[in-house]
Amino acid sequence: MSCGFSLDHYRELLDAAHEGGYRCAGFDRPPVAGDLLLRHDVDLSLEAALTLAELEAEAGAWSTWFLMTRSVFYNLASAEGERALTRLRELGHRIGHHAVWPHVDLDERFDRVVAWHNPDPGYMAAPIDGATNAMTAPWFDPPHYRSDSNARWRNGCPHEALARGDFEWLQLLTHPEIWVYPGATMRETMDSYLDAERAARLEQLRSDRIDLD
Ligand SMILES: [Zn+2]
Ligand SMILES: [Zn+2]
């Protein structure tokens, strides 16, 4: 098994967690032994989020999707954004807010849970009025946390440790774009993302009645 960032290996991660006896959990109660808190920060692409969300549902898993209201890459208030929100809920997932400091735009679209986008250490773990901050105790604790930031695992891919049941519980943060778009490096993955984005933009131009002939 190779630990690349691909849909195949994401599925293998989920299967490894299942083998290790873990069950999906969210941020609505403190983690207990055997919990796997799947968390996704959606930085770039709702399309990638939906692809991974469907894969998780097929594998019998669910996660908490942190979506942005102030992204420069996607618009959650667009028809596409509304479709993504509806589909994620239909599949049994939960939706948190991926906030851009200092704005917390919690509304009825979100569960009361927030994770900051690209946080500075100064406010990353600060309490948030009326919401759970995903990076605070008891949900965040370094030995119980792994993330795939920039297509690099700081402590290695956790699939083997999950299969062995090594973690008492784990918050696993992954970014859907890294797994959905092919590439051996972050740069290659971003080039694949941009190719897909160009094709999608051409479709959007057509449906916006722009003459492309
Ligand atoms: Zn692996
Ligand atoms: Zn982010």
Image (cartoon, rainbow, N blue to C red):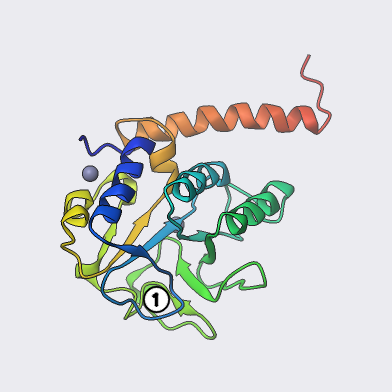
Where residue 42 sits in the image (x, y, percent)?
49, 53
Which residue is located at x 57 percent, y 47 percent?
Answer: 46
Q: Which amino acid does the dot numbered 1 rest on? A: Tyr
Neighbor class of circle 1 (other Cα within 10 Å; few <14, some 14-19, many 20+) is few
Which residue is depicted at the point 33% across and 50% down? 14
Q: Quadrant of the N terminus?
A: top left
Q: Residue 8's image quarter?
A: top left
* Residue 81 or residue 57, whichever sits in front: 57
Residue ID at (22%, 57%)? 20
Q: Left or right: 83 with respect to 16?
A: right
Quadrant containing the C terminus in the rendered view = top right
Q: 137 above or below 8?
A: below
Pick the front one: 96 or 195: 96
Q: How far across and down, in percent of the image, does residue 96 sit?
A: 52, 66
Figure quarter occupied by ligand 1? top left
Q: Is residue 17 left or right of residue 56?
A: left
Count the marks: how many?
A: 1
Check disc 1 and report its element: helix, strand or loop.
Answer: helix
Asked whether, in this view, residue 131 is left or right of residue 25, the answer is right
Question: Which residue does the image show at 66% across and 55% down from the upper left?
Answer: 86
Is 109 drawn above or below residue 49 in the view shown? below
Q: Is residue 179 above or below residue 211?
A: below
The verdict on label 1 being within 8 Å of ligand 2 is: no
Picture coordinates of residue 9, whole percent (x, y): 31, 39
Most foreground residue, 207 or 4: 4
Residue 149: % across, % down: 32, 51
Residue with the mark numbered 1: 123
